Amino acid sequence: LGLTDIQQLAGAGQLFDTLTVYENYPRISTASEGTDGLGLSISSAIDATHYPLTLAVNPAGDAMRLRLDYQPAALDQSQASLILARYQHLLHQLTTAADRPLAQLDMLLTGELETLDDWNGIHNPTLLSSTLPDLFAAQVVRTPDAPALVCDGGRFTYAELDARANRLARHLISFGVGPEDFVAVYLPRTADLVIALLAV
C-alpha cells in the first residue's frame, strides 16, 4: 500500500503528487571488508516511487546523476522523458549563464515555443487586434449550432452559451455593473465558470 493511498484512506486527501529528492550522503562502497575477513556486497537494488512523478538527484563525482521515476498510470515514457529533458535544459542554462535572472530562463525546448505560437495563432493579425468577446461573438455568428462547451455531461452550442452569458451580463447591469468595473468570479471549473467569464 503506497503512502498516497494511506493518506487518502485516512481522509487527508492528496497532499502532493510530485517528489524531488536530493541524495547528498557519503557513498558507501558496494563491497566492504571488515577486520574479521567478512565482507558485504550489494549485487542489485530495486526502488519504486509512491508518487506519479519522482526526481532523484545523486552526486556522481564532479557530475550529477538525475533519475526520474514515474507511475505508468499517470505518465507514459515519452511524457516523462520530455519532463526530464526540460529539467536538464534549465540546469544547462543555470550553469552557462549564472548571472541570468530566474524569470528569464527558458523552460521550453527548441521548437516548443514555435509550436505554442502556432496553436495560439500568435502570428495571425486578426487575433492580435481582437478581444476574446469579439472573437467569441464572431464565432457565434459563423457557427451558432456548433458545440462550444462540453462539461460534466452537459453540452452547449455557441448560440446557447452566448444566450446564457448575455442573460447573466444583463443581470449584472441591473445591479449597476458597467464597463471597467471589477467583478469577482469564484466558481469551480464548470460550465457556469465559462458563462460567468464571458458575461463579465
Image (cartoon, rainbow, N blue to C red):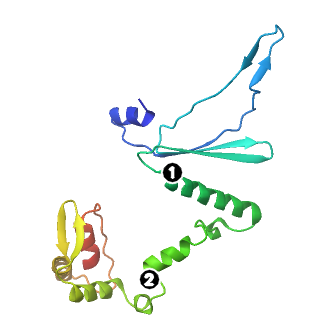
Classify residue 175 as left or right of residue 20: left
Q: Position of residue 7 (x, y in %)?
A: 39, 35
- Above or below — where is 163 with respect to 190? below
Q: Secondary structure at mark 2?
A: loop
List the single residue furthest toward the right.
35
At 22% from the left and 82% from the top, the residue drawn is 176
Q: Quadrant of the C terminus?
A: bottom left
**113 or 135, nearer to the observer:** 113
Q: Position of residue 19 (x, y in %)?
A: 53, 44
User: Is there any visible trace of residue 110 in the rendered image?
Assistant: yes
Classify residue 92 as left or right of residue 54: right
- Above or below — where is 153 with respect to 52? below
At 61% from the left and 58% from the top, the residue drawn is 85
Classify residue 137 as left or right of residue 20: left
Q: Quadrant of the N terminus?
A: top left
- Residue type at mark 1: give it: Gln
The residue singled out by tag 2 in the image is 121
Total numbered labels:
2
Which numbered disc, 2 or 1, marks the residue that appears first in the sequence? 1
At 55% from the left and 58% from the top, the residue drawn is 82
- Residue type at mark 2: give it: Gly
The residue singled out by tag 1 in the image is 77
User: Is there any visible trace of residue 200 in the rendered image?
Assistant: no
Q: Position of residue 107 (x, y in %)?
A: 59, 65
- Above or below — where is 162 with respect to 154? below
- Residue 102: assigned label: none
**66 or 182, nearer to the observer:** 66
Q: Quadrant of residue 34?
A: top right
Q: Decide: few, some or many residues near mark 2? Use Cα within 10 Å; few <14, some 14-19, many ≥20.
A: few
